[in-house]
Amino acid sequence: MRFNGFIAALLFAILIAWFLPEGPEILPLKTITDIGIGFIFFFYGLKLSPAEFKAGFYNYRVHIIIQLTTFIIFPLLTLGLLPFFEDGMGSSLWVALFFLGALPSTVSSSIVMVSLARGNLPTAIFNASLSGLIGIIATPLWMSLFMASSSQFEFGAVVQKLVIQIILPLVIGLFLQKFLGNMARKNSGKISFFDKSVIVLIVYSSFSSAFASELFSTVGLVDLFKLTAMVIVLFFIVYFGLAIVSRWMNFATEDEITAKFCGTKKSLVHGSVMVKVIFGNSAANALYLLPIMLYHILQLLVVAVFAEGYRKRERQEIKT
C-alpha cells in the first residue's frame, strides 16, 4: 500500500502540473529539488550498513549476474529496439528508453520484495546497494556514448554536477555513518518519505515544464502505446531470461528469487535525480522520465504478484 500511495502521489503531481503548468511562483522548485537531491544521497550514505553489505559479499555468482544484467544486458536490449524508432538515435523517445536501460536497480523495493518472497536477503541488500553506487558513474557514462554531440549533454558539466550533488553528499554520509548511521536506519521510514517527496517535486517540476512548452503535443497516442509495450517486453525478457540463467547456473531457489527481483528493477529515485544532473532543467525531462515511471509502476505490481506467489508456495511446502 505504501508503494501504491507513492504512485498515486506521482500521478497527482502530473495532474497538478497539467492544470498549473507554470507552477507556483513563490516556490523556488529548482533550488529545493537540487538541495533535496543532495540530501537523498547523504542519507543513502548514512543508511548503508557495513554489516549487511558484508553479509552478502561472498555470493559472487549472483552478484555478477545481477550487475551484468543491470548495466550491460539491459542497455543492450534497449539499443536493440533502436530500429523501431524512425529517427534512430535522434529520437527523444528512444533516448528516454535507453536512459531507463542505463539506470541502476532500486534499493528499498528490491529488498522488500525479496524479503516477502523469502529470497536471499543479504545478497539482495548487497546488490541493491552496490547497484546504486555503480549507477552514479555508469548511467552518465552510458548516456555520454550517445549524447556527446548533443547540445543537451555536456560531459564536463555533468561530471561537475555529479560530484557536487551526488558523490560529495554520499561521501559525507559514509564518513558520518559511524556516528549517525544507527539513527538514520532507525528513522528509515521518515527518510524514505523525504526521498519520495523530493521525487514527487522533481516529477511535478519536469512535467510542468513539459506542459508549459507543449512538449507532449509531439508525442502521439501510438508512440505512447509503443513505448508502454516496449517497457513491458523489456521487463519480461529480463525476468524470464534471469530465470533461465539462474537454473542453468544451479542457483538455489533463494538466489534465483534475488537474481530475478534485483536484476529486473530500475530505480525511479536515481532516474529522477540523474535526469536533472544530465539534462539540467530541460523541458524534455518529463519525456525522459516517462519510461522509468511506466516501468516503476509495472515492476512494483508484477513483482509483488510474483513475490506473493513464492511466499504462498513456501507456506504450502511447510504444511506438507
Image: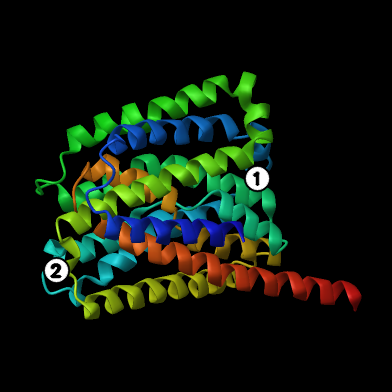
Give the residue number, with chain letter if any, for mark 1. Answer: 56
Residue visible at 55% across and 43% down in the picture: 193
Residue visible at 27% across and 74% down in the picture: 224
* SS category of the residue bearing label 2: helix
Q: Position of residue 114 (x, y in %)?
A: 65, 59
Give the residue number, with chain letter if any, for mark 2. Answer: 218
Task: Look at the picture and state if 215 lies above or below 149.
Answer: below
Residue 96: tell me if it is visible.
Answer: yes
Residue 270: tell me if it is visible.
Answer: no
Q: Is residue 45 left or right of residue 159?
A: right
Q: Residues within 10 Å of mark 2 (few under 14, many from 20)?
A: few
Instruction: State the CA–CA distance, disc 2 to disc 1.
Output: 46 Å
Residue visible at 31% across and 33% down in the picture: 162
Name which of mark 2 and mark 1 comes first in the sequence.
Answer: 1
Task: Look at the picture and state if 244 lies above or below 24.
Answer: below
- Identity of the amino acid at label 2? Thr
